[in-house]
Amino acid sequence: MQTNPHSRLKAFCVLALVVGLTAVHYTFGGHNMDVHLFHRELFFIPILLGAFWFGMSGGIATAVASVVLYIPRLIFMQGHLTWTTLGFQAVVFLMVGALLGWLSDRAKRQRQAALDAERQAVVGRAATAVAGEMAEILGALRRMTAEKPENLGLDPDYQAELDRLQNMVEALSNYAPTPKKRLSTDINTVIKEQVARFQETAEQASVRLVTSLDSKGCPIHVNDEQLGDVIAALIRNAIEASPNGATVEVSSLRSGACCELSVKDQGPGIKPEHQARIFTPFFTTKPGGSGLALAAGRKVVSTMGGELTLQSTPGEGARFIITIPRENPET
């Protein structure tokens, strides 16, 4: 439940209605059952508001409060209502609160999904345009290096900056991936290719890069190039986050109808306040980082019907997990 001032005012309104109706219910009407049945109808007002404003939890909480406060007054009116009738009234309160709360939650999720999709589309279009421009600039710089390296002063950091720019171009391109042909492949094959690609980088950083692969393998139907780019970004981040002598483990697991791939490091981990934003475009805590690799990775994996998630405890490293549906889950 939200805790901003606007939400607190709504909660106060619901509470005030319940308390006010309870006072009226116990003060007026005497033994006139028609009056108390009218009070019953009034109790639906705070239940409806609680469900509409605060979802299922708010609807149920308001319904429970209404039952606890409304029913006892009728119990004292012996002979007017049976226990079955009272129980049915309690069930109706709870059902209305739960059902309307569920509908309210679903509507909020749908609105949020539509907003997210619109935002992703806008960022994706911008990323595609920027990536195209950056790729042209990068290509020109590389041609200059190949043709006349003396004009660049032979800066030893120049190539490293070009590589960083290339990584940014790839991240931008992946954030708005174009539809590519999917093929049947084994997730272990994709892992081995990327681990071999980064072995030298890991050695230079004094980090052990190891694998723990499911011996049965795990067939998936994906674009191996796009998935490879996502794995590469995860391995690169893990190596950069790891201290000297640490180990980065890339593993695979056939789990039910899915294939699970994980990249685990022994770095400082990710702070809890950052974990909720780690997949947000342009959010980064790494100096010089683009904040796009993880956002692009999650988007790419999502287009494959999978999910990219994070498990991290500060001081104990981070573990990024890719879950993708198996090609033939029945086998």
Image (spheres, rainbow, N blue to C red):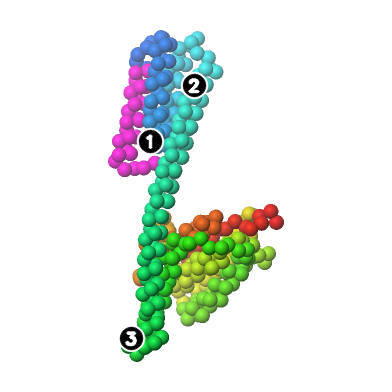
Please name the residue shown 38% across and 25% down the image: 45
Which of these two is toward me, 325 or 283?
325
Please name the residue shown 60% across and 63% down the image: 183
Please name the residue shown 53% across and 76% down the image: 197
Tell me the distance, in whole angstroms, between the alpha carbons under discs 1 and 3: 62 Å
- Residue picked out by circle 2: 89
Please name the residue shown 57% across and 58% down the image: 324
Q: Which amino acid does label 2 sit on?
A: Gln
Q: Does residue 325 appear to the left or right of 310 in the view shown?
A: right
Q: Does residue 308 appear to the left or right of 47 in the view shown?
A: right
Q: Are marks 2 and 1 in contact (CB under 8 Å)?
A: no
Nearer mark to the viewer, of 2 and 1? 1
- Element on which disc 3 rests: helix
The image shows residue 193 at horizontal and vertical percentages of 57, 73
Q: What residue type is labelled 1?
A: Trp
Above or below residue 109? Residue 13 is: above
Q: Does residue 240 appear to the left or right of 152 in the view shown?
A: right
The image shows residue 297 at horizontal and vertical percentages of 47, 62
Residue 109 visible to an observer of this rendering: yes
The image shows residue 200 at horizontal and vertical percentages of 51, 80
- Residue occupying the far right of the picture: 331
- Element on which disc 2 rests: helix
Above or below residue 281? Residue 78 is: above
- Residue picked out by circle 3: 152
Tell me the distance, in whole angstroms, between the alpha carbons under discs 2 and 3: 83 Å
Q: How crowded is mark 3: few (under 14 residues within 10 Å), some or many (20 or more)?
A: few
Span highlighted in magenta in the image: 1-25
Quarter of the image with the N terminus in it: top left
Above or below residue 128? Residue 94 is: above
- Residue picked out by circle 1: 53
